[in-house]
Image: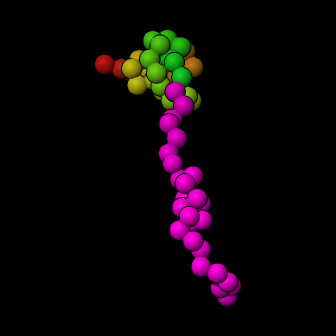
Amino acid sequence: MAVPKRKTSKAKRNQRRANWKLTTPNLSKCSKCGELMMPHRVCKACGTYNKKVVVEAE
């Protein structure tokens, strides 16, 4: 098996791990009620998808 030739320094190791951050979810406005929602999903506020009522909302 391959074995590292040199010890990886703390700086090099931390530079590699610096890009593990989370990204915020992309949100879009509902075409019916204007509430922020995730794209390509049913709106939780009004229950519509693609300007059609899919789920009955309270």
All told, the count of numbered labels is 0
In this picture, is 28 found above or below 10?
Answer: above
In this picture, is 14 found above or below 55?
Answer: below
Q: Position of residue 35 (x, y in %)?
A: 44, 17
Name the residue rendered at 55%, 54% in the picture: 18
Q: Is residue 16 visible?
A: yes
Going by the picture, which residue comes out furthest to the bottom?
1
Instruction: Judge whether residue 21 is colored magenta.
Output: yes
In this picture, is 14 found above or below 29?
Answer: below
**Front one among 1 and 35:** 1
From the viewer's perspective, tell me whether residue 4 is left or right of residue 43. right
Q: Main secondary structure of the magenta part?
A: loop
From the viewer's perspective, tell me whether residue 26 is left or right of residue 36. right
Q: Is residue 52 visible?
A: no
In this picture, is 49 found above or below 25?
Answer: above
Name the residue rendered at 43%, 21% in the picture: 47
Name the residue rendered at 50%, 17% in the picture: 30
Q: Position of residue 41 (x, y in %)?
A: 51, 30
Name the residue rendered at 59%, 79% in the picture: 7
Q: Position of residue 50 (x, y in %)?
A: 57, 20
Question: Looking at the rendering, in which quadrant would you find the C terminus?
Answer: top left
From the viewer's perspective, tell me whether residue 42 is left or right of residue 4. left
The part of the chain drawn in magenta is 1-27
**Front one among 24 and 9:** 9
